[in-house]
Image (cartoon, grey):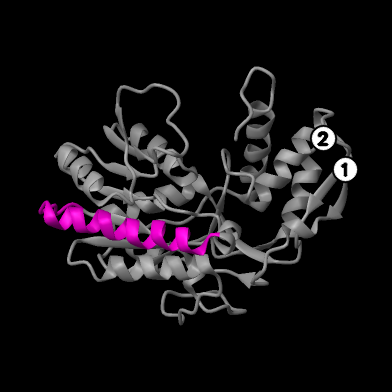
Amino acid sequence: MTSHPLITGATGFAGGHLLNTLRRDGSKVYGWHNPAGRAPHGSDAGVEWTAVDILDKAAVRRALSAIRPSAIYHCAGIADVHQAWKTPTATLRMNVLGTHHLLDAAKALGLSCPILVTCSALIYRPSGEPLTEDHPVNPTSPYGISKLGQEMVATSSPLPVLVARPFNHAGPRQDVHYATSAFARQIVEIEAGRHEAVLRVGNLESRRDITDVRDTVLAYRALVEKGTPHRPYNVCSGHAYRIGDLLDTLIGLARVRVRIEVDTDRLRPSDVPFMAGSPDRIADETGWRAHIPIERTLEDLLNYWRTALTPAHPRPA
């Protein structure tokens, strides 16, 4: 059967890397992007782009009816945990209501294709131990609450919905609202002489399970192909990295010497000190495991910013 999957949020961080992965497989890909958000760039005859407001129920149904995809990867949504504290209502609407509109349209159209919903590990109750999918849920942030609502919408659907619970992921093209990307961009700007050699940081003691985004999207593909509908799967490396150690690795790759200052604006209202997951379920049931070492992730992220911030390239928003 011809593969022609749909990616919602295809211009986003994970969505963009997923699009690259599926195109390498030879699939024609339908990409949806927010009309008010990041526009597609580049040209690829194998990608058909459509601007769709996921909060517009009628628009979602029209766009889905026009393509009837072989699979749906739902990556659209608000992913900024820090911003969700400032705009909790918008976060809830986008992540919960937007998912409802997509699944409701798919049901009304009689689609039977697999639908992956990318939820979040931030629905779990904080713990000092690696989390399995059976760990109690108890989100501690507006973002986590929105993702729990999203997952409840997904698992209540009669459609073949796959549920991913990704932990942190990092890599090239990541937004500077995330720690490793913020560090890397600052280092590159210091290298270029744009700023004094001071790296402004938030909490460096938190420990996070971080997977390379290029491994993360391979997990999404594996779940669509081999996962069990309505059964949640952690997408994680199984290892918690101290943020300060990741910063040390990036500084070690820098071409200049820098000093560190704590910036209170970068401290979050609620920062869980430790978060790691168990990847055993997804490994056992689909064969997926993370393979890209964190050192390569950080080096590639640094090199991405070196390229993106050169005069020949536009400065990312």
Q: Please, is residue 24 above or below residue 131 in the view?
A: above
Q: Nearer the viewer, residue 92 or 30?
A: 92
Q: State the extent of the magenta-drawn residues as a range.
A: 87-113
Disc on res. 258: 1
Task: Find disc 2 in the rendering and name its residue.
Answer: 190
Q: Tell me residue 177's x, y (percent).
A: 63, 49
Residue at disc 2, secondary structure: helix
The residue carrying pointer 1 sits among few (fewer than 14), some (14 to 19) or many (20 or more) residues within 10 Å by Cα, namely some
Magenta stretch secondary structure, dominant: helix
The residue carrying pointer 2 sits among few (fewer than 14), some (14 to 19) or many (20 or more) residues within 10 Å by Cα, namely many
Q: Residue at x 31, y 22 (%)?
A: 45
In space, the residues marked 1 and 2 are separated at their CA atoms by 8 Å
Q: Residue at x 63, y 33 (%)?
A: 304
Q: Nearer the viewer, residue 142 or 277?
A: 142
Q: Nearer the viewer, residue 62 or 294?
A: 62
Residue at disc 1, secondary structure: loop
Is-magenta flag for residue 89? yes
Q: Please, is residue 274 above or below residue 107 in the view?
A: below
Is-magenta flag for residue 105? yes
